[in-house]
Amino acid sequence: MNTFLKSTFLAGFLLISASLMSKDRDFSISLGTVNAKTINFEISNAKNVSLFVYNDIDGEIFSEKLNAVNVISKSYDLKELSTGTYYLVAESEGKVEKYRISINKDNVMEVDKTPVSVINKPEYTISGNFVKLHMSEVKKPVAISVTDFADNNYYTATKQSDNGEVNVTFDLDRNTSQNYVIRVEDENGNVFNKIISLK
């Protein structure tokens, strides 16, 4: 087997391994039973995960930050909440999951077991002046731009996914600007801005 072919296999293996490791390290929520107005759930890989409950009228009602690698069990007593629709949101560096909580006029609470939305955030790998942008589970085109703080534009493109992934590498010049802003807008209009400092 020639050296080029070996290198190609190795590069492919590393990319697949990195993708699987990225998925493995992100949190996972398993919603359990609802007793009266208490919601029970388990969360695994909860390293740097923020949990909060909110609704559109009152905003954030409750929040906490988790930092655990093992599976942990949580219970939230929501008996003080009145009739309406609320959301349990879990957010990490890699994704956001949102679950609907409904309290009807009879004061009975129901929780959707599957998230109403899952947002996979862009991931960045920085090596010197090279910045690699990676997105997974992408179904529709995403808009990507690179600007500096003076709003000079260096890159604008709409990228299609390749097998559900978007990978773009930028060669940023520190002589042109020491700070860049990479803006990504996904299919649902969610916007993610990342400041890259090359100082």
Image: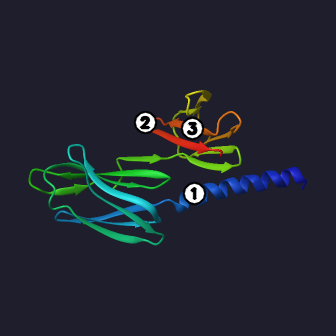
Provide residue 95's location: percent of width, then percent of height. 46, 51
Residue 82 relative to residue 26: left or right: left
- The numbered mark, 3 or 2, whose residue comes first in the sequence reads 3
Q: How is the image coloured?
A: rainbow
CA distance for labels 3 and 2: 18 Å
Q: Which mark is residue 22?
A: 1
Residue furthest to the left in view is 106
Q: Which mark is residue 115?
A: none
Residue 165 seen: no
Q: Nearer the viewer, residue 51 or 30?
A: 51
Q: Nearer the viewer, residue 158 or 32?
A: 158
Q: Nearer the viewer, residue 31 or 27?
A: 27
What residue is at 50 percent from the left and 52 percent from the top?
A: 94
What residue is at 14 percent from the left and 59 percent from the top?
A: 80
Provide residue 6's location: percent of width, then percent of height. 84, 55
For the N terminus, give its image quadrant. bottom right
- The numbered mark, 3 or 1, whose residue comes first in the sequence reads 1
> Circle 3 sits on which residue?
182
Residue 156 relative to residue 32: left or right: right
Residue 195 seen: yes
SS category of the residue bearing label 1: helix
Bin the neighbour count of mark 2 within 10 Å (Cα to Cα): few under 14, some 14-19, many 20 and up.
few
The image shows residue 196, relative to residue 141, as above or below, that is below
Which-is-in-front pick, marks 3 and 1?
3
Provide residue 168's location: percent of width, then percent of height. 65, 39
Provide residue 81's location: percent of width, then percent of height. 16, 56
> Circle 2 sits on which residue?
188
CA distance for labels 3 and 1: 21 Å
SS category of the residue bearing label 3: strand
